[in-house]
Amino acid sequence: MKSLLLAGAMIIAAGITVFAQSGHWVVGNRATSKCEIVTSNPVINAQVGGDIWFGSGPYQSLDDAKLARSNLSACPKEEEPAPAGAAGENK
């Protein structure tokens, strides 16, 4: 009986850690020279020849991650796309 309770507690604990890992992370990618937003916990592997050189997060929402990306000094500033029909049209 005790072993059954222990096994149940371990299953619940494992389920809680899975949900705790959800969110959004901001990562620096050397291959693209950009900061990207990912939904899984990044593996920082720059010292062993990988492309991911930093990670920040987790953030609860995509908007929070975008705000963090815009405030990180390591991230190049993203250009906001112009509204459709606003550039170069003469009426």
Image (spheres, rainbow, N blue to C red):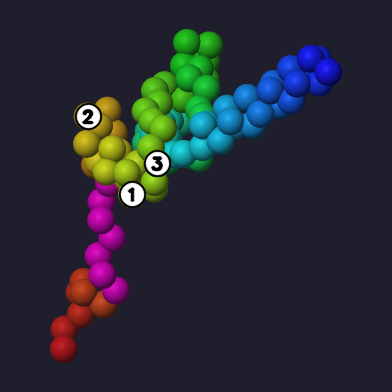
Q: Is residue 10 visible?
A: yes
Query: Of residues 60 and 86, which is closer to you in this image?
Result: 60
Residue 41 sits above or below residue 60 on the image: above
Residue at the location (52% across, 31% down)? 21
Name the residue furthest top.
47
Secondary structure under badge 3?
A: loop
Q: Which amino acid type is shown beneath numbered disc 2?
A: Ser
Residue 49 sits above or below residue 38 on the image: above
Does the stretch in magenta take in 82?
yes
- How far is mark 1 from mark 3, CA to CA? 9 Å
Closer to the observer: label 2 or label 1?
A: 1
Residue at the location (16% across, 89% down)? 91
Name the residue furthest right.
1
Closer to the observer: label 2 or label 3?
A: 3
Q: Assign the magenta stretch its main secondary structure.
A: loop
Q: Which residues are magenta?
A: 78-84
Residue at the location (41% across, 32% down)? 58
Q: Which amino acid type is shown beneath numbered disc 3?
A: Gln
Q: Which residue is mark 2?
A: 73
Q: Which amino acid type is shown beneath numbered disc 1?
A: Asp
Q: Which residue is mark 1?
A: 63
User: Which dot marks residue 60?
Assistant: 3
Among numbered discs 2 and 3, the one appearing first in the sequence? 3
Q: Position of residue 80 (x, y in %)?
A: 25, 56
Query: Of residues 88 and 34, which is closer to you in this image?
Result: 34
Q: Position of residue 69 (x, y in %)?
A: 30, 38
Q: Position of residue 74 (x, y in %)?
A: 27, 28
The answer to which image quadrant residue 55 occupies is top left
- How far is mark 2 from mark 1, CA to CA? 18 Å
Q: Position of residue 52 (x, y in %)?
A: 46, 25
Query: Of residues 5 and 16, which is closer to you in this image?
Result: 5
